[in-house]
Amino acid sequence: MDEEKKWEDRTNADFNTGDFSPCLEWLELQGLRQRVKNVSQQLDAVFHKIIAEHEQRKGRCSAEEEDEERHKDLVDVLVDTEITLKNKKAILMDMFVDGVETTATTSEWIMSELVANPHVMKRLQEEIDFAARKNEKIKLSNIATMDYLHCVVKETFRLHPISPLLIPHESMESCIVEGPHHHYSIPKKTRIVINDWAIGRDPSVWEDPLEFRPERFVGKYFDITIDPDLRIVPFRTGRRVFPSVSMAIANIEIALVHLVNYFNWRSKEELDMNESFGSTIP
């Protein structure tokens, strides 16, 4: 791979000179701004074409077909809404582009932890055998009953959050945050970065926080999307919660069930579980 290809394959976590030396930002020394603009234009063209195709298909549908409520996909639903074209494209960006790399990374962490903890994999396989009754094809209804599967996914989100520092927020009003040992006064319009990686490994909240133990969630109701105590917030929370939470979790669980059900996984040597720094941590 030549140097030019390496440069093009770098992630959105690239070091940017302008971030650390604002006086040099106007020079655009690394060409990052132009690269981002080029990618943005390409994505915009793709989303515009997808939405246009669905609008044309909707126009060709007869009233009879509409009455029968033909199967609609996500874009069909967006086309029927009154939001602007720009917002429709933004939602598609969130649902698909943001979810591809993060879903793949989370799946790799789950499989790595299962290989490193064979007893967890064995228990998960036993649950799959019981829930699916050794059916040749596993159904979504089977997956919905797999409690231990859900615990494995939650534990992975706790120990290996998709985005360790989440998306930056900004305080809308001045506020005071009080804790057992600290007292903070946060002015209005302050940029706030939430360390989800540290929250999931806090020993005051989690017992043996560095151990991969899905059992900690067994028999407990714990919704990672709306946890009132904010012990795990991999998809953010409140009004800026990740819009495709359900789709992301479903994709991960479906892939995981099939990988574990049809194959036995092992490693001849100890896995390297070190993390790589970035906007996500593969």
Image (spheres, rainbow, N blue to C red):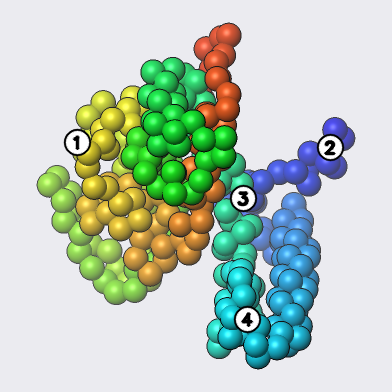
- Residue at 40% x, 36% y is 131
Crowd band around label 1 with a 10 angstrom C-alpha radius: few (<14), some (14–19), many (20+): few
The amino acid sitting under disc 2 is: Glu
For disc 1, the marked residue is: 204
Task: Give the label on residue 3, or none.
Answer: 2
Provide the residue designation for mark 4.
79
Q: Nearer the viewer, residue 244 or 242?
A: 244
Rendering coords of residue 68 (x, y %)? 59, 81
Q: Residue at x 20, y 64 (%)?
A: 176
Residue at image location 44% in from the left, 44% down from the top: 143
Q: Secondary structure at mark 3?
A: helix
Q: Tell me if I can see residue 77 in this picture.
A: yes
Tell which tag, 4 or 1, sits nearer the viewer. 4
Q: Earlier in the sequence, mark 4 or mark 1?
A: 4
Q: Earlier in the sequence, mark 1 or mark 2?
A: 2
> Upstream in the sequence, badge 3 or badge 2?
2
Q: Amino acid at mark 1?
A: Ser
